[in-house]
Image (tube, rainbow, N blue to C red):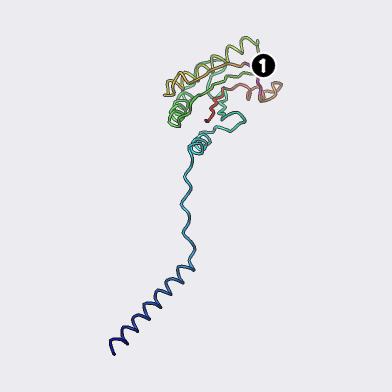
Amino acid sequence: MRVDIAASRWARLLVAGLFCAFLAACASPPPAPAPKAMSRIERIEAALRAMSFEKEEDGWYLSLPAPLIFPFDSDVLATDARDNLTRIALQLRELGIDRVMVRGHTDNVGAREYNLALSKRRADAVAAMLGEGGYPFDRIDSKGLGFSLPIADNATVEGRAKNRRVVIIVQIT
C-alpha cells in the first residue's frame, strides 16, 4: 500500500510538472520565423543598389560624371576610374548580368559631330575597361549619343556638367 501511495504521489507531481511546462509553453511567444530567402532578382537588385545603380523604368542605371572619369576634352580614363570600373566589371560578372549597355553623353558646347564622336570614344573607353576588368566583351553594347539626351539645362554651367557623363545600364531578366 505504501508503494501505491508513493507512486501515486510521484504520478501527481509528474502530471503537475507537465501541466506547468505546458502552460509555460503556451505563454511564451512563438519562435521567430526564419528570414525569407532572397530570390535571385532580389539579390541582384540589392547588389546593384549597393553599387549606386538606380532603378529606372527600363533598367538599372549608373551615371558616371565625365569630370570624375575623364580629363577635360579627353577619352583617356583617369586612374581612379579604371580601378572603379574594374571592380564594377567583376561584380556585374559575378551577379550574372546578361548584357551591359554603355552610353556616352556630352553637353551642347561645340559642334554636334565632335560631341557625338567624343561621347562614342568615352563610351568605348568605359566598355573596354569593363571588358579588361573581367566582364565579357561580347556582352557589352557601347554607343555615343552626343548631346541628344540631356538630363539638365545646357544653358547653365551646372547643367552642362551634369550632361557630360557616361551611363552604364543593365537589365535584369
Check if residue 15 falls in the magenta segment. no
Mark 1 neighbour density, 10 Å: few (under 14) some (14–19) many (20 or more): some
Residue 33 x/y as whole percent: 48, 54
Q: How many numbered discs, if any?
A: 1
- Which residue sits at x=40%, y=73%? 18
**Residue indicated by mark 1:** 108
- Which residue sits at x=47%, y=45%? 37
Residue 24 x/y as whole percent: 45, 70
Which corner quadrant holds the N terminus?
Answer: bottom left
Check if residue 148 falls in the magenta segment. yes
Residue 149 x/y as whole percent: 65, 20
Vertical arrangement, residue 47 with respect to residue 73, above or below: below
Q: Quadrant of residue 119?
A: top right
Residue 106 x/y as whole percent: 62, 18
Front residue (pair 102, 15): 15
Q: Quadrant of residue 57?
A: top right
Q: Return the residue found at the far right.
A: 155
Q: Amino acid at mark 1?
A: Asn
Front residue (pair 96, 156): 96
Vertical arrangement, residue 104 with respect to residue 12, above or below: above
Horizontal side of 65 relative to 29 (left or right) equals: right
Q: Which residues are magenta?
A: 146-150
Q: Return the residue found at the far bottom.
A: 1
Q: SS class of the residue under badge 1?
A: loop
Horizontal side of 73 relative to 33 (left or right) equals: right
Q: Main secondary structure of the magenta part?
A: loop
